[in-house]
Every structure is written in structure tokens, then in C-alpha cells.
Image (cartoon, rainbow, N blue to C red):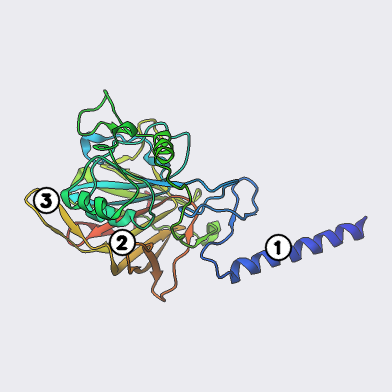
């Protein structure tokens, strides 16, 4: 019996070494992840956030979510897999939230209008993009170049207006509405976009103490990401309060990215032009640590990727990532916040 047990231990040890070797040496842009339920590597991870799944990969979709002070609190934002935030008209920010198909998201919103730079970012994914109108430049761009546009003005059946909010902050949608628009238009549910590289969380002893504040120069849009070392996640605060959905679900993330770029006002309304291609400085906060580097994106069909100072592509923790796009002169970044 002891010899059999010893043999099994040896086999298990070699199996672990083999799996680890393949993880380390794989040329794929997707790595095996540890399953939170089984504590074992899983073969299937979602391209959008590195989370394990079974069966067919859930499809991704994008929703333009309002962040005006009159639009708060949001619906469903805490369940997003990836979020881009930047200023649309100073100092007001808006969210491009990328979701992975989840039937439990009964309400998402308030849904708001598109802008050209958000259209640029959604082109990384080629997925359904839900919004309510947009600037002339954004709508023209979508009409000419995008095949998965879901504008409430022309596809109103996939949205509804809430009686509990005032217009224009009252347009809502849901995961089921996205399923409907995909089925009605015969769109594919295959995620054809490229994945980032994902990794396991750092062990507790390797975690740091870094958080970050993103100051849009007005108290209503002051953002603080407070790091929780034990849970290895960042808790979002906005306007001095924990940022939560209507149902009280807190907005948290596994990775925070500061993407520095340039922007300028292009009209009397204060609408902006923002650089989305090329390269620029970046800071990635993960595992309580801070990684300085750059972002790069050559063409609209490619993912924005992030690199450290040695030009190695940064590996992200599985789970939600927030990209805080810091336009020149509009945002102050404090690169360390320690909980008192």
C-alpha cells in the first residue's frame, strides 16, 4: 500500500511540473488559470477577463454607461469585466463597460451617448455596442465602419426608459436585450478579439500596499482605488463614497490601469478628441504593486496592450480591469494611497 501511495505522489509531482512547464513555456497569449472553485488550473478562460468557464465561451458586449452625478447610482456596473473611464466634457466622465454574457444582469445603465474615442476602443472587440445616440462624429464613424451598432434611436426595442429616473439619465438595457439583438440580427457570438495575457494572483507575501487616486479636479468625480491586501482587490470610491450599484454591490477590480494620453476640445459644447492609437505612458496597479511602463496600439482592430519598462507585456490578474484614461492636463494621479 505504501509503495502504491509513494508512486501516486511521484506521478502527481511530475504532472504538476509538466503543467507548470507548459504554462511557463507556452507561446499562446492566454495562460492557464487557477480555478477559484477547484484550486486547479483550468483549460478555458474568457478572453475578456481571464476568468474560467465551462462549455461555450460567453460572448462579450459593450454598453456606454452614464456617470453624471444625476445618473447615480448605476445598474450592473459592478458586473463588468473591463471598463474604460475618461472625461467626455470636463469634468464629467463616462464608462465604456464590457460585459461577459451573464443572465443575472437584469438591468444595465443608465445608457448614454457615444463619443469617437469610445467607438475607437470598442473596435478592439468587434462586439455589440449599446448606446443612446452620440456626437455627430461618433455616429458617422459607427455608420461607416461598425457592424454591431445598437443605437437606441434606431433599435429602441432593446432598451427601455425607467420611470424612476429623469431623462436623459433613464435609459436602461439588460443582458437578455443583448441576447435578443444578437438573435434578431443573426450576429455571431464568437469572441474574435485578441486576449491579454493572464496570470495567477501573487501570493500574500508578495503583495504590496499601493492604491491610486484619480483626481478629475472636482469633488464629484474624485476617484480613489483603495487596495485590500487580503482579498487582493481594489475598492472604488467616487465623490468620497464607496462606488456601488443601486443594489449595493460594490465596484471592485483586480487590476487598475492608468493610461496617459492626449486630448483636446473640438467644439463649443466641450466635446473632446482623444488619442487612442500609438503609444504613451502607463501605470498598472495589481497585487498591491505598481508597474510603470507604456501602452501600445497600432491599428483600431488591435487590442491596447501594456508593457513594463523592460518592454515585456504585462500579465493581468483574472477578473475585472479598469482603465483610467488620463488626458493631459485634466487629471491628477496620486500613485500611492494607504488605508489609514
**Within-10-Å neighbours for mark 3: few <14, some 14–19, many 20+:** few
Q: Is residue 290 visible?
A: yes
- Tell me the distance, in whole angstroms, between the alpha carbons under discs 3 and 2: 21 Å
First in sequence, mark 3 or 2: give its number: 2
First in sequence, mark 1 or 2: give its number: 1
Measured from the top left, where is residue 150 in percent x and y? Answer: 31, 42
Q: Which residue is mark 3?
A: 270
Image check: 288 left or right of 92?
Answer: right
First in sequence, mark 3 or 1: give its number: 1
Measured from the top left, where is residue 40 in percent x and y? Answer: 65, 53
Q: Which residue is mark 2?
A: 259
Number of the label disc, if any, that sits on residue 16? 1
Disc 3 to disc 1: CB gap under 8 Å: no
> What kind of element bears circle 3?
loop
Measured from the top left, where is residue 288 in percent x and y? Answer: 44, 58
**Within-10-Å neighbours for mark 1: few <14, some 14–19, many 20+:** few
- Tell me the distance, in whole angstroms, between the alpha carbons under discs 3 and 1: 57 Å
Q: Residue furthest right?
A: 1
Image check: 48 left or right of 324?
Answer: right
Q: Nearer the viewer, mark 3 or mark 1?
A: 3
Q: Residue at x 53, y 48 (%)?
A: 57
Amino acid at each position: 500500500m505504501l509503495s502504491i501511495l509513494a508512486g501516486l505522489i511521484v506521478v502527481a509531482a511530475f504532472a504538476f511540473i509538466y503543467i507548470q512547464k507548459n504554462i511557463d513555456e507556452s507561446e499562446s497569449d492566454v495562460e492557464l488559470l487557477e480555478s477559484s472553485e477547484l484550486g486547479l488550473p483550468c483549460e478555458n478562460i474568457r478572453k475578456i477577463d481571464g476568468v474560467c468557464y465551462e462549455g461555450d465561451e460567453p460572448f462579450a458586449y459593450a454598453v456606454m454607461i452614464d456617470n453624471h452625478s444625476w445618473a447615480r447610482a448605476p445598474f450592473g456596473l459592478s458586473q463588468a469585466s473591463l471598463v474604460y473611464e475618461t472625461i467626455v466634457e470636463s469634468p464629467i466622465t463616462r464608462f465604456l463597460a464590457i460585459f461577459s454574457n451573464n443572465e443575472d444582469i437584469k438591468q444595465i445603465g443608465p445608457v448614454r451617448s457615444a463619443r469617437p474615442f469610445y467607438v475607437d476602443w470598442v473596435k478592439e472587440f468587434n462586439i455589440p455596442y449599446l448606446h443612446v445616440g452620440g456626437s455627430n462624429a461618433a455616429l458617422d464613424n459607427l455608420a461607416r465602419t461598425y457592424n454591431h451598432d445598437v443605437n437606441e434611436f434606431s433599435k429602441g426595442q432593446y432598451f427601455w426608459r425607467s420611470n424612476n429616473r429623469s431623462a436623459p439619465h433613464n435609459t436602461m438595457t439588460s443582458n437578455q436585450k443583448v441576447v435578443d439583438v444578437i438573435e434578431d440580427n443573426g450576429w455571431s457570438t464568437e469572441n474574435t478579439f485578441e486576449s491579454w495575457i493572464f496570470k495567477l494572483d501573487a501570493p500574500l507575501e508578495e503583495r504590496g500596499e499601493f492604491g491610486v487616486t484619480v483626481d478629475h479636479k472636482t469633488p464629484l468625480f474624485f476617484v480613489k482605488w483603495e487596495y485590500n491586501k487580503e482579498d487582493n482587490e481594489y475598492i472604488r470610491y467616487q465623490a468620497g463614497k464607496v462606488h456601488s450599484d443601486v443594489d449595493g454591490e460594490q465596484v471592485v477590480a483586480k487590476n487598475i490601469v492608468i493610461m496617459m494620453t492626449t486630448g483636446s476640445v473640438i467644439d463649443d459644447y466641450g466635446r473632446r478628441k482623444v488619442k487612442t492609437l500609438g503609444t504613451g505612458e502607463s501605470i498598472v496597479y495589481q497585487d498591491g504593486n505598481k508597474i510603470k511602463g507604456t501602452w501600445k496600439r497600432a491599428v483600431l482592430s488591435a487590442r491596447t496592450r501594456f508593457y513594463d519598462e523592460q518592454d515585456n507585456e504585462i500579465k493581468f490578474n483574472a477578473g475585472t480591469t479598469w482603465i483610467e484614461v488620463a488626458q493631459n492636463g485634466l487629471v491628477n494621479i496620486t500613485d500611492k494611497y494607504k488605508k489609514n
